[in-house]
Image (cartoon, coloured by chain):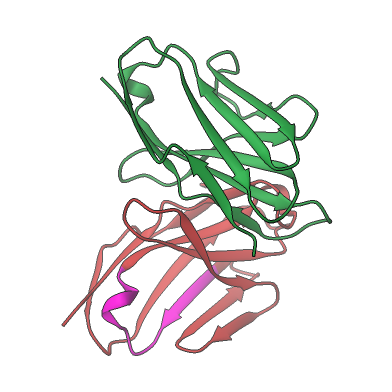
Chain colours: A red, B green
Amino acid sequence: RKEVEQDPGPFNVPEGATVAFNCTYSNSASQSFFWYRQDCRKEPKLLMSVYSSGNEDGRFTAQLNRASQYISLLIRDSKLSDSATYLCVVPAGGTSYGKLTFGQGTILTVHP
Amino acid sequence: GAVVSQHPSRVICKSGTSVKIECRSLDFQATTMFWYRQFPKQSLMLMATSNEGSKATYEQGVEKDKFLINHASLTLSTLTVTSAHPEDSSFYICSARWVAGDTEQFFGPGTRLTVL
Protein backbone atom coordinates (compact mmCIF):
# COMPACT_ATOMS: atom_id res chain seq x y z
CA ARG A 1 0.00 0.00 0.00
CA LYS A 2 1.32 3.44 -0.90
CA GLU A 3 2.07 5.78 1.99
CA VAL A 4 -0.49 8.26 0.74
CA GLU A 5 -2.88 7.52 -2.09
CA GLN A 6 -5.42 9.73 -3.80
CA ASP A 7 -7.78 9.41 -6.71
CA PRO A 8 -6.02 11.55 -9.32
CA GLY A 9 -9.28 12.50 -11.03
CA PRO A 10 -9.73 14.74 -12.85
CA PHE A 11 -12.98 15.89 -11.36
CA ASN A 12 -14.96 18.23 -13.59
CA VAL A 13 -17.88 19.85 -11.81
CA PRO A 14 -20.18 22.81 -12.47
CA GLU A 15 -20.17 25.87 -10.30
CA GLY A 16 -22.22 25.37 -7.16
CA ALA A 17 -21.66 21.62 -7.05
CA THR A 18 -20.47 19.67 -4.04
CA VAL A 19 -17.42 17.52 -4.60
CA ALA A 20 -15.51 15.16 -2.32
CA PHE A 21 -12.03 13.70 -2.51
CA ASN A 22 -10.70 10.75 -0.58
CA CYS A 23 -7.20 9.94 0.52
CA THR A 24 -5.88 6.79 2.17
CA TYR A 25 -2.71 6.50 4.21
CA SER A 26 -0.70 3.50 5.32
CA ASN A 27 0.87 4.58 8.62
CA SER A 28 -1.65 3.91 11.35
CA ALA A 29 0.46 5.93 13.79
CA SER A 30 -0.10 9.17 11.88
CA GLN A 31 -1.65 11.80 14.11
CA SER A 32 -2.06 14.81 11.87
CA PHE A 33 -3.03 15.31 8.29
CA PHE A 34 -3.16 18.17 5.84
CA TRP A 35 -4.87 19.20 2.67
CA TYR A 36 -2.91 21.54 0.42
CA ARG A 37 -3.98 23.08 -2.83
CA GLN A 38 -1.58 23.68 -5.65
CA ASP A 39 -2.26 25.88 -8.62
CA CYS A 40 -0.52 25.20 -11.89
CA ARG A 41 3.21 25.94 -11.69
CA LYS A 42 2.88 27.31 -8.17
CA GLU A 43 3.89 26.14 -4.73
CA PRO A 44 1.43 24.18 -2.55
CA LYS A 45 -0.53 26.19 -0.02
CA LEU A 46 -2.03 24.85 3.16
CA LEU A 47 -5.79 24.56 2.96
CA MET A 48 -6.70 22.66 6.12
CA SER A 49 -5.15 20.76 8.98
CA VAL A 50 -6.87 17.74 10.52
CA TYR A 51 -5.93 16.52 13.98
CA SER A 52 -9.01 14.84 15.37
CA SER A 53 -12.11 13.60 13.62
CA GLY A 54 -12.41 16.54 11.31
CA ASN A 55 -12.25 20.22 10.59
CA GLU A 56 -14.51 22.72 8.88
CA ASP A 57 -13.66 26.06 7.35
CA GLY A 58 -16.40 27.76 5.41
CA ARG A 59 -17.20 25.69 2.33
CA PHE A 60 -14.47 23.18 3.10
CA THR A 61 -14.84 20.21 5.42
CA ALA A 62 -12.17 17.64 6.13
CA GLN A 63 -13.00 14.36 7.86
CA LEU A 64 -10.73 11.73 9.30
CA ASN A 65 -11.55 8.06 9.70
CA ARG A 66 -8.74 6.48 11.68
CA ALA A 67 -10.20 3.00 11.64
CA SER A 68 -10.22 2.90 7.86
CA GLN A 69 -7.18 5.17 7.53
CA TYR A 70 -8.65 7.69 5.17
CA ILE A 71 -9.18 11.42 5.06
CA SER A 72 -11.75 13.16 2.94
CA LEU A 73 -12.13 16.74 1.73
CA LEU A 74 -15.58 18.06 0.90
CA ILE A 75 -16.05 21.27 -1.03
CA ARG A 76 -19.53 22.74 -1.08
CA ASP A 77 -20.85 25.38 -3.48
CA SER A 78 -17.83 25.07 -5.76
CA LYS A 79 -16.38 28.24 -7.24
CA LEU A 80 -14.37 28.65 -10.42
CA SER A 81 -11.45 29.67 -8.22
CA ASP A 82 -11.50 26.26 -6.54
CA SER A 83 -9.99 24.77 -9.70
CA ALA A 84 -6.62 23.41 -8.62
CA THR A 85 -4.84 20.23 -7.62
CA TYR A 86 -5.61 19.11 -4.07
CA LEU A 87 -2.83 17.34 -2.24
CA CYS A 88 -3.32 15.04 0.70
CA VAL A 89 -0.30 15.26 2.97
CA VAL A 90 0.74 13.07 5.86
CA PRO A 91 3.79 13.64 8.05
CA ALA A 92 6.24 10.79 7.53
CA GLY A 93 6.58 8.57 10.55
CA GLY A 94 3.41 9.97 12.07
CA THR A 95 5.09 13.04 13.55
CA SER A 96 3.70 16.51 13.11
CA TYR A 97 5.35 18.98 10.79
CA GLY A 98 8.43 16.88 10.15
CA LYS A 99 9.02 15.25 6.80
CA LEU A 100 5.87 15.37 4.73
CA THR A 101 4.64 12.72 2.34
CA PHE A 102 2.47 14.04 -0.46
CA GLY A 103 -0.21 12.17 -2.30
CA GLN A 104 -0.20 12.39 -6.07
CA GLY A 105 -2.93 15.00 -5.99
CA THR A 106 -6.50 15.20 -7.21
CA ILE A 107 -7.22 17.57 -10.07
CA LEU A 108 -10.40 19.61 -9.79
CA THR A 109 -11.83 21.73 -12.56
CA VAL A 110 -14.91 23.82 -11.83
CA HIS A 111 -16.65 25.05 -14.97
CA PRO A 112 -19.35 27.70 -15.46
CA GLY B 1 4.50 36.76 8.07
CA ALA B 2 6.16 33.39 7.37
CA VAL B 3 7.34 34.18 3.86
CA VAL B 4 9.79 31.97 2.02
CA SER B 5 11.47 33.12 -1.15
CA GLN B 6 13.40 31.24 -3.79
CA HIS B 7 15.84 32.51 -6.35
CA PRO B 8 15.89 32.20 -9.26
CA SER B 9 12.28 31.49 -10.14
CA ARG B 10 13.29 30.05 -13.46
CA VAL B 11 16.58 28.93 -14.95
CA ILE B 12 17.55 27.45 -18.28
CA CYS B 13 21.03 26.02 -18.57
CA LYS B 14 23.15 23.82 -20.76
CA SER B 15 23.83 20.22 -19.92
CA GLY B 16 26.91 19.83 -17.74
CA THR B 17 26.66 23.14 -15.93
CA SER B 18 25.90 23.62 -12.25
CA VAL B 19 22.93 25.56 -10.98
CA LYS B 20 22.49 27.04 -7.52
CA ILE B 21 19.03 27.66 -6.07
CA GLU B 22 18.56 29.77 -2.95
CA CYS B 23 15.83 29.38 -0.38
CA ARG B 24 15.35 32.16 2.16
CA SER B 25 13.00 32.58 5.09
CA LEU B 26 12.34 36.32 5.02
CA ASP B 27 10.72 37.02 8.35
CA PHE B 28 11.49 34.08 10.57
CA GLN B 29 14.35 31.81 11.50
CA ALA B 30 14.29 28.29 10.15
CA THR B 31 16.44 25.58 11.68
CA THR B 32 15.07 23.11 9.18
CA MET B 33 14.44 23.51 5.50
CA PHE B 34 13.22 20.86 3.11
CA TRP B 35 13.94 20.48 -0.58
CA TYR B 36 11.36 18.88 -2.87
CA ARG B 37 11.28 18.05 -6.54
CA GLN B 38 8.17 17.83 -8.66
CA PHE B 39 8.15 16.36 -12.16
CA PRO B 40 5.28 17.19 -14.55
CA LYS B 41 1.97 15.68 -13.50
CA GLN B 42 3.52 14.15 -10.42
CA SER B 43 3.44 15.11 -6.77
CA LEU B 44 6.17 16.61 -4.64
CA MET B 45 8.92 14.24 -3.65
CA LEU B 46 11.15 15.08 -0.73
CA MET B 47 14.80 15.14 -1.75
CA ALA B 48 16.51 16.14 1.47
CA THR B 49 16.17 17.72 4.87
CA SER B 50 18.52 20.59 5.52
CA ASN B 51 19.45 21.47 9.10
CA GLU B 52 21.28 24.66 9.94
CA GLY B 53 24.90 24.01 10.77
CA SER B 54 24.91 20.32 9.95
CA LYS B 55 24.91 17.99 6.98
CA ALA B 56 21.74 17.47 5.06
CA THR B 57 19.83 14.22 5.26
CA TYR B 58 19.05 12.82 1.83
CA GLU B 59 16.15 10.59 0.90
CA GLN B 60 16.78 7.22 -0.62
CA GLY B 61 17.73 7.45 -4.26
CA VAL B 62 18.86 11.08 -4.15
CA GLU B 63 22.57 11.50 -4.91
CA LYS B 64 24.14 13.73 -2.30
CA ASP B 65 27.15 14.46 -4.51
CA LYS B 66 24.92 15.65 -7.29
CA PHE B 67 22.53 17.72 -5.20
CA LEU B 68 24.68 19.73 -2.81
CA ILE B 69 22.85 21.36 0.07
CA ASN B 70 24.24 24.05 2.30
CA HIS B 71 22.32 25.53 5.23
CA ALA B 72 24.80 28.06 6.53
CA SER B 73 22.41 30.33 8.39
CA LEU B 74 18.98 30.26 9.97
CA THR B 75 17.50 32.06 6.98
CA LEU B 76 19.27 30.56 3.98
CA SER B 77 19.63 27.15 2.42
CA THR B 78 21.06 26.52 -1.03
CA LEU B 79 20.66 23.60 -3.39
CA THR B 80 23.28 23.19 -6.09
CA VAL B 81 22.53 20.84 -8.95
CA THR B 82 25.96 19.83 -10.18
CA SER B 83 26.62 18.78 -13.77
CA ALA B 84 22.97 19.12 -14.62
CA HIS B 85 21.44 16.89 -17.28
CA PRO B 86 18.08 17.08 -19.07
CA GLU B 87 16.60 14.50 -16.69
CA ASP B 88 17.22 16.97 -13.84
CA SER B 89 14.73 19.36 -15.41
CA SER B 90 12.03 19.77 -12.80
CA PHE B 91 10.26 22.12 -10.41
CA TYR B 92 12.33 22.46 -7.24
CA ILE B 93 10.49 23.72 -4.14
CA CYS B 94 11.84 24.43 -0.70
CA SER B 95 9.98 24.75 2.55
CA ALA B 96 11.02 26.10 5.92
CA ARG B 97 10.02 25.36 9.47
CA TRP B 98 10.19 27.78 12.39
CA VAL B 99 12.82 27.47 15.05
CA ALA B 100 10.39 26.98 17.91
CA GLY B 101 9.29 23.38 17.91
CA ASP B 102 6.93 21.72 15.51
CA THR B 103 5.13 24.16 13.33
CA GLU B 104 3.70 24.37 9.90
CA GLN B 105 6.01 24.27 6.89
CA PHE B 106 5.99 27.30 4.63
CA PHE B 107 6.75 26.76 0.99
CA GLY B 108 8.77 28.87 -1.36
CA PRO B 109 7.38 29.73 -4.80
CA GLY B 110 9.56 27.16 -6.52
CA THR B 111 12.30 27.20 -9.14
CA ARG B 112 11.69 25.77 -12.57
CA LEU B 113 14.88 24.26 -13.95
CA THR B 114 15.22 23.41 -17.62
CA VAL B 115 18.41 21.70 -18.74
CA LEU B 116 18.99 21.73 -22.47
Q: Is residue B91 magenta?
A: no
User: Is residue B73 toward the left or the right of residue A103 in the image?
Assistant: right
Classify the position of the N terminus of chain B by image quarter: bottom right
Residue A70 versus residue B40 in the image, above or below: below
- What residue is drawn where x is 33% and y is 86%? A18
Q: Residue furthest left?
A: A112
* Residue A36 at x, y percent in the picture: 49, 63
Residue A112 visible to an observer of this rendering? yes
- Image coordinates of residue A48 in percent, x first then y, are 56, 73
Residue A10 lies left or right of residue A7; in this view the side is: left
Residue depicted at x 47% and y 57%: A44
Residue A3 in sight from this viewpoint: no
Furthest residue in direction front, as rendered: B26
Residue at 38%, 24% in the rendered image: B88
Left or right for B66, reference B40: right
- Residue at 77%, 35% (x, y): give it: B52
Q: Which of A13 and B81 lies nearest the eye of the viewer?
A: B81
Q: Is residue B13 shown above or below A78?
A: above
Which residue of the protein is positioned furthest toward the right in this rendering? Answer: B100
From which residue to which does the magenta span run?
Answer: A71-83
Foreground: A11 or A84? Answer: A84
Of residues A12 and B98, which is closer to you in this image? B98
Q: Position of residue B70 (x, y in %)?
A: 67, 26
Coordinates of residue A9 in the picture (x, y in percent)? 29, 62
Q: Quadrant of residue B78?
A: top right
Q: Name the quarter where the C terminus of chain B is drawn.
A: top left
- Residue B12 position (above or below residue A110): above
